[in-house]
Structures are given as C-alpha cells and as structure tokens.
Image: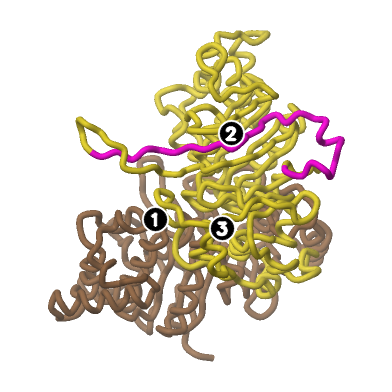
Amino acid sequence: MPEPLLQVNDLKVHFPTDDGLVKAVDGISLQVMPGETLGVVGESGSGKSVSFLTVMGLITSKQAIIEGEVIFKGQDLLQVPPDEMRHVRGEKISMIFQDPMTSLHPFYKVGAQVGEAIRAHQKVSKKEAFDQAVEMLQRVGIPKPEERAAQYPHEFSGGMRQRAMIAMALSLNPDLLIADEPTTALDVTVQAQILDLIDRLREEFNASIVIITHDLGVVAEHCDHLQVMYAGKIVETGTADDIYYRPHHPYAWGLLGSITRLDEAQKERLRPIKGLPPSLIFVPPGCAFHPRCPYAFDKCKVDVPELLPVDGQHAAACHLPLADKQRIFAEEVAAR
Amino acid sequence: MSVSVTEPSTAPTEQARTPLVKLIGVKKYFPITQGIIFQKKIGNVHAVDGVDLEVYPGETVGLVGETGCGKSTLARVIMRLYDATDGQILFDGQDITKAKGRELRVIRRNMQMIFQDPFASLNPRRTVGSIISEPFRLHKTTPKGGIKAEVQQLMELVGLTPEHYNRYPHEFSGGQRQRIGVARSLALRPRLIVCDEPVSALDVSIQAQILNLLEDLQEEFNLTYLFIAHDLSVVKHVSDRVAVMYLGKIVELASGVTLYQNPKHPYTGALLSAVPIPDPNLAARKKRIILEGDVPSPIDPPSGCRFHPRCPNAQFPICKEEEPQLEPQRPGQVVACHFPLPDRAIMEEGAEAPAG
C-alpha cells in the first residue's frame, strides 16, 4: 500500500468566543492517497471548510485551539513555522475557493494575478511570470489567453473567473489541490465544465484533489472516496459506491433522500432531514445527529458513536445494529 | 397532467379551461444609452424576445435556463414589475399589459413572488411580524380575526414558531428566512406565486424541506406556480411542465419526464447531461454534451437559431439563417430546432429505474 499524501490524525479545531467554545472540527481523521479524488460532504457549519483551511495553515493557533496532526509527505504541517508554511502553501498544496466573484482582486489584470502566484515562489521576471500565466490560462481552457490575461476580473464571466482561479492554483504544480465548493455559485452547465476540467487536470498534473461540497450529486461522478461530515465529526466514510448504494448512517440516508433526482419516473415526495444542524457551541450529547434522527434510541442520547469499519474502507459512526441498518436502508431509502 | 399550449388538437377538455396566465409574444428590451445630457439609444438588451406561454390554474410550470437567459426578467414582466416592450399578458382572461393604479393593485393581490436570496429580500430592520403583515397594510385590508392572529397562523402554516413574531430576520437561518418569504407571499391568498430560484441559495437538506412545503401549500390553497431555477433536476421535480429558455426565447416545452427521457433540443440535452446525478453507475451511463463557452450577449443575439454557435449538431447555412419555430414533436412537447435530437439521446432506456 502506498504512503498517503496527506494524513490527518484526530484533528480538533475549537474557536473560543464570548458565547463559549465553538467546536468547529471535533476529532477527524482522514487520508488522501496520491492521485485520488476525495469528496467531503456536509451541510453548512459541519466543519468541512474549517478542517481544510487548517490543513492549509490558514487557520492557525492564533485564532483557534488546534490539536492533532496534519501529516503531509511525512511532515506535520501544524508544527511548521509560518514562514516555511508559505512555501508549502501554493507550491505543494493550493486551494480554490467557493466564490469566484470575490476571490480575484478587481484592480489587477487577471494575468498579473496569476503571475503574482508564480513570482511569490519562483525568481522570475514579471514578463516571464506573465508568459507563464498566459500558458496556464490556456491550459485551463480560456480562449484567446493573451487577450484575456490583459483584462480585469469584471470582464470575465463566473465560469471564466473560476478557471482563472484554477490556473492560479495549479501554476506551481502542487501535489494537492483543495477545491472548496468550487461550483456552488455557478450554473449547472458551467459546473459540468469546471468539474470536467478538474478531472482532466488531475491526470495532467498528477495531483490529488479534495472536493468540498454540500451536494452529494456533484461528487458522485468525480470522487473515488467520500467523507460525510456532521457537526465537526466524520459520520461515514467509504468509496463512492459505499456511500451511494450501501450507506450506513441515517444522515447519509437523509442527504440522499433530500436530493431532487432527474431519474425519478414519477413525482415522488422528497424526504428531507427534519430540523436544523445544531449549534456548534451546544453540540447535543451522545450522537450529535440524534435530535434529527428518526431511528434514534436511548443509547444515542448518551454515548458518542465511534467510527467503526463496516468492510474494507467503509466505516460509519452509528449505534444502530447492522441488521437494522440494512433493513431500514432497503425498505425505506433505496425503495423510493 | 396538462397539455402543451401550442397544441390545440390534443385535448379539447384542456382547451375549455382558461389559462390563469397567458403570454402572447411578450418582449422586454432594455435600452443601452450613450451620453449624459443628450442620451441616445445605441442598442437594446434583448432580455425576453417573444415568449408565448400559458399557465393553467393549479399547475406548476417550470422555467429553466442559464444565467442571463431572461427567465427572471420574464417573471418580473408577468408580475408587472417591468413593463413589457411588446406583446400581451393576460391574467385570468383579462389583459393586464397596460393596467395601472388601482386596477393593477387589485390584480397584484392575486399574484405574489418568492425571491432567490433570503438574506437580501427581507428588511433587516423590521420584525418578522411586520414583514409578513406588510401586504395587508399595502392593500389596506384587514383579515378576519385581526392582522396579528392571521400572521401567526401564516407562520405556523409555513413551519415557523408563531412566538417568533417579534424577532428580526438575522435571528433566523437561511431556510427559515425563505419560509418567512413564503409566508409573506401567501398573506393575501394569491392565485399565482412566481418563485424565482427559491431554493438555489440553500443547503440540499433544507432545499428539500422548502420544496415539500411549496407542494403542500399548493395542494391546500390550490395555488398555481411559475417556478424558475437553473437546476433542471429541481425544476423537473416540482413542475408539471417545463419550459427551457435560451437567450430570451423558449426553445422547448414538455413534461419533466418527457424532457428527461427524450429531450429534443440540443440545448435541453446539454442542460440535462450537465445535471449531476447522485448515482455513480447511472452517471457513468449518461451521454455527455459539454457546451463550450458562455451564453452569447443578448445585446446582439446570433442570427437564425440563437443556439447555433454553441450547438454540436448545427448545420449550415440553415441554422445560421433561418430561425426555427416551436413545433410539436409529440403530444405535449414542442421544440424550436431544425434538427431535433433522436429519442433517448442522453439517458439510455430503462435508466430511470432506481438503481442500487
């Protein structure tokens, strides 16, 4: 078995606030293998973005109480001093953000912004950096890259801006690309273009990719492995097939039941998860999902379920006995 | 359910019903001007460019298309928030295209709107109670039992706690705010509700709650919806019929299931193939049409078929020179294309059976 590129061990990120301790990430472990695509799925406030901002070193011990290990290529990133971290960030790990409208600087030309990323890490002249930026823009599928590089972000459409962001993120050939909701603000047609581009670039640049999203549909076609997060914890993990065809956690069932499916032959009623995600200051005792879970029993209110392996890489954190899970899933979720 | 508009022959019983909303050749152009004192018109944004559509009482018509295709403009023209440049809007048989003043206010009572962004569509300085009761004040009516009782009843109806009457919008989550918007739109018991991307700003699990709520309310109050979204799977789920819009025109209109199984317009096919399917095996069996580039500028729309520069099946010169008209393909499906797709162009036969 090859070494994982990124190994996160029992990571906790807690923010002290006036109202109490916000347990945004509460003990997650995961790994990303070289060349694979990992999908991280969860609702707003489940801690998926915070985990990876911490991996990137964008949340530090100045803002939060961080525990655990983030091992990237044998090195614990949480122990790396900030000025060395600047070399890791961008060169080895880079990130694409959700909102392409606000993540580019409106006063600078797109080519200069992509070039800036190159100049921050390599000793090249502005001219050379600009030429490299043009080449990157071409590789991410921007037509007429020379003209486009000399334009400002407002002259780009949403999809084009996201492409420019991807060009910037890949300009230093990183080993790991983290895409935080890369398509949420975009039209479905553009979303398909961007996801295809990320897939193609994974092969071309031989990078590993993490896609963070709230939409299980988005990751079905593009991810090898999935992690489902809820209230700062991983509640289920497995291959894409495990999560879509044999999910074991009621939260995963709820997510699947919430999606409007194009392939339904007749109109069927959606089965949303009742209620709202909990406050991360007062996380419910026991299983954090129990107040919204239709199958919760007494044990769920007291004991925190552990992430236990089901088979292979498939693991779920739920107290329900396996036979009950299989029966409920077959009868109530898959039958729809 | 209901049968297509431009197909008079198919269902005489449907014809007997009057449509609640009827659009005839509706156009909306926004002028582009140059100069400050002597403004001169240098062009037009052709936001909506000749739309015919009928919406029957009690049905849900979906309107789907990419950003900039004119779907929100069309909604606003129907609501009379914009004046149509050309064409006619009939509401319950009455021509409202030129209605103003008191006449318009009476019509507006029967049509309400739910907006996309629950964060921007509620006044942050007003309490929820005052937001939901605004329509009563505007229309100078008092419901039976008083305004407060009615508002609390509305809040309960949409799944909010009536005791939260005096809270402010910032105290609610996105999904709850959208419920406030729904309650406000229901206050006057309208007949038509125009939903402009009502769930696209919400998490999937919350989306499902709101979609179910809209369905329940439709049944309870016999509402008619015009449902606008860019996500075909959401539109297909809620709608009886779906109209696909591209650059200000309707290019295809059919029931959701027909669109999914047998899309005829290549643009519909492309939209369909772009929608993510939460099922890895099914997704792998889907044929892909990935569109290149973005929607062209509506200032100077392409000649002939507006989709021809991005269309994988375009044949020249006909697609570039001759504009296709909406023509029936099968009962309940009309398409504007010179070379419609064959049946089952995107999803294989049997692909709609739930897998797994």
Residue A241, horizontal then vertical, whole percent: 67, 73
- At a point 73% along the width and 41% down the height, the residue shown is B5
Q: Which residues are magenta?
A: B6-34
**Is label 1 in a helix, a strand or a loop?**
loop
Q: Quadrant of the N terminus of chain B?
A: top right
- At a point 22% along the width and 78% down the height, the residue shown is A131
Residue A231, horizontal then vertical, whole percent: 53, 54
Question: Which chain is indicated by disc 3?
Answer: B
As shown in the figure, which amino acid type bears the numbered disc 2?
Arg
- The colour assigned to chain B within the rendered structure: yellow
As shown in the figure, which amino acid type bears the numbered disc 1?
Asp
Question: Which chain is indicated by disc 2?
Answer: B
Q: Which residue is mark 1?
A: A99
Q: Is residue B231 visible?
A: yes
Q: Which residue is mark 3?
A: B322
Q: Quadrant of residue A12?
A: bottom left
Whether residue A43 sits left or right of residue B331 in the image: it is left
Q: Quadrant of the C terminus of chain B?
A: bottom right
Q: Which residue is mark 2?
A: B179
**Is label 2 in a helix, a strand or a loop?**
helix
Q: Quadrant of residue B269?
A: bottom right
